[in-house]
Amino acid sequence: MNTTLQAFAIKNGRFIVNGLLRDPFKMKEHENKYKQNASFPLHRSKLPKTNDIRSMDSITKLTCKVTYYGNLRTEIEHIDSGAKAQTDAPVDNHGMGRSLSPTDMTCASLASCMLTVMGIKAKSMNLNLDGSHADVTKVMADAPRRIKEIKVKIFLSEKLSEADRKVLEATALNCPVAKSLHPDIHQDVRFEYLALAQIST
């Protein structure tokens, strides 16, 4: 070991670790931080399980099981509830159109998500959106085949104030599905306010 370095360390109250000078107070502080971090379970399998959607378990939790039954038809089973839905290829893409196609579901999910988050926001504002609905139009493109545009028209009560309308519209436009879709998919979203009798028909 370098005798000059050793002498300097002794004189100045330092340790020599792997040939480098170390401050004992900083080493102790680092050791305490390590102990605090070590008390948290680092291995993924040892993390505490919880139903909180914000937990890390929600990242890996199985959501659905999808089974292919032939003839371009699938069945989707929701794991938590056991609810099932079917998809079928559309008539313009080798299918029979007996049910929603996967791209139909994508477009419908946008409107469904918008109505859902508006419902959540409305509840916190003591508003009732029962009967509100949305019309959805899918526009496809080729080469490659894909969704080009989703048109959504949302019908809400005309009794909503201007301030409430702005809040609900902003909530809808920032729903999780809207923020998850590819930016190349144009989202044409419009809001129309009608009498309650017109909404429910």
Image (tube, grey):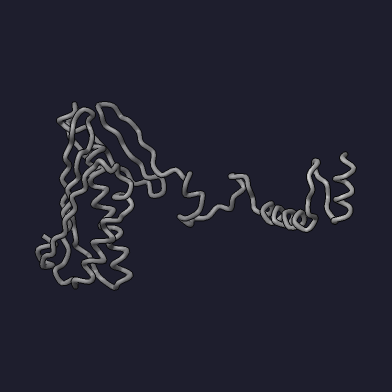
Name the quarter where the N terminus is drawn. top right
Total residue callouts: 0
Residue drawn at 81 percent across, 41 percent down: 19
Name the quarter where the C terminus is drawn. bottom left
**Quarter location, residue 143:** top left
103, 86: nearer the viewer:
103
**Quarter location, residue 164:** bottom left
Q: Position of residue 124 (x, y in %)?
A: 33, 70
Residue drawn at 31 percent across, 65 percent down: 121
- Vertical position of residue 68 compared to residue 177: above or below: above
Residue drawn at 31 percent across, 55 percent down: 175
Q: Where is residue 88 in the image (x, y as percent from the top left)?
A: 23, 34
Single out the residue that lies furthest toward the front.
4
116, 171: nearer the viewer:
171
- Vertical position of residue 105 compared to residue 145: above or below: below
- Vertical position of residue 168 compared to residue 23: above or below: below
Apparent side of residue 11 relative to residue 116 in the rendered image (left or right): right
Apparent side of residue 189 relative to residue 13 in the rendered image (left or right): left
192, 126: nearer the viewer:
192
Q: Where is residue 115 in the image (x, y as percent from the top left)?
A: 25, 57
**Quarter location, residue 75:** top left
Q: Position of residue 126 (x, y in %)?
A: 29, 73
